[in-house]
Image: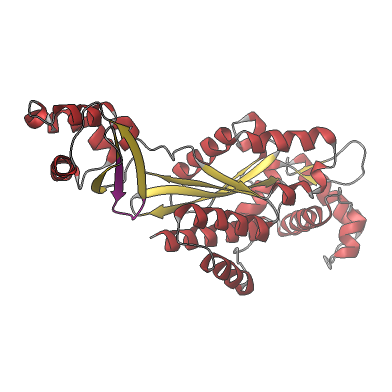
Amino acid sequence: MNNLELSEREKSILRYVIHQYILTANPVGSRNISKKYDVGFSPATIRNVMADLEDSGLLGHPHTSAGRVPTDQGYRFYVDSLMGVPKLPITEKRAAESALNSSSHNTDDIIKATSTILSNITNQLACITYPQLSDSILEKIQIVKLSTTKILVVVSVLSGLVKTITLEMRSNFGQSDLTNIQRALNQRLAGLKFSEIRETIVERFQSIYATQYKPIIRVFLDSVDRIFNDKTENKSVVTGTKNILTQPEFEELEKFQGIIELVEDRDVIVHLMNDSILLDKKNVNVKIGSENLEEKFISYSLVTKKYNVGEAVGSVGIIGPKRMEYSKVIATVEYIAELLTKNLN
């Protein structure tokens, strides 16, 4: 749709129709544009231009109204060509920084606080997926004896993230034995990606498998997927349900139920968000309505941006009606992603 060529008059009218529809959620008529904006055209001229924009697929015409509404293609043209440079006011930037600084330094708390900030600024549904550790590099492993049959494995990655796992042992090893195993693990695995560890751990421990440490080495080999798989891959924080339900789109019971079902289906949200940041790793990615292949999302827009924690990557996103203030949402998502990267590294 970016290849569609519009005259300056058509661009101007399309921009005003979208601005007015975003503001009011009501179909926009030619007289409304003539009165509200200083366009320099008569209502008749505006009406003719709007008809041409409808023929081009950029505006729609609801049967119950004489006004027009933007189509998915119209929103896409607006975002790509008419919107201008997204900017977030410095006051909201400072408010976001202050709110984040007042939270704890725990990863969970930072992500939860950031999601709340994002939803409050945009008044939409915010979602942040946890950083995926598959490409993260192991810094060290620590083993702590909890009882005669239980050990706590503490896994640290270079980005600073830490995960802990409790493992069961059939044999009773002393802390000195566990320290030796810990040393062997770090000598063979530190500096490797999680994916490399999963693929090569068996061959890396063949030389000591036949020693007295075989029972505990067996425990680690059997638990490699638990220890070095990314259990946060589908973990996410979703906030702002109350915000989005205030939007006029959800006054109808059917649409209200639809957004509630969407919020409850976290797996679909996480899947789409992670897919979207793979498509555009550097910039904010915007998917509008039918551009979302998942049927549940065709009534919404999804705005996402990746954030980094060392080598690990997560996503920051906004889900809302197609009638959203794209410039502000895009600027907010971009800034929050940068802020999250800064605070988690």
Figure quadrant of residue 329: bottom right
Report whether residue 135 is seen: yes
| Residue 335 position (above or below residue 133) | below
Residue at coordinates 55% horizontally, 33% vertically from top-left? Answer: 267
* Residue segment shown in magenta: 152-161
Quadrant in the rendering for residue 224? top left
**Residue lying at the far front of the rendered structure:** 148
261 vs 16: above or below: above
Image-based side of 197 in relation to 240, left or right: left
Across and down, in percent, residue 126 comes to: 62, 50
Residue 186 in percent (x, y) is at 17, 45
Main secondary-structure element of the magenta-colored stretch: strand
Is residue 205 shown left or right of residue 112? Answer: left
Which quarter of the image is occupied by the C terminus? bottom left
Above or below, comparing residue 300 to residue 29 in the picture: above
* Image color mode: secondary structure
Q: Position of residue 237 (x, y in %)?
A: 56, 46
Going 36% across and 52% down the picture, which residue do you hit? 161
The quadrant in which the N terminus is found is top right
Instruction: Give the left or right position of residue 182, taking residue 27 as reference.
Output: left
Pick whichever, 332 or 325, lies toward us.
Answer: 332
Q: Nearer the viewer, residue 267 or 32?
A: 267
**Residue 82, can we see it?**
no
Q: Position of residue 28 (x, y in %)?
A: 86, 51
Counting every numbered tag in the picture gives 0
- The correct choice, above or below, for 165 with respect to 22 in the image is above
Q: Is residue 219 magenta?
A: no
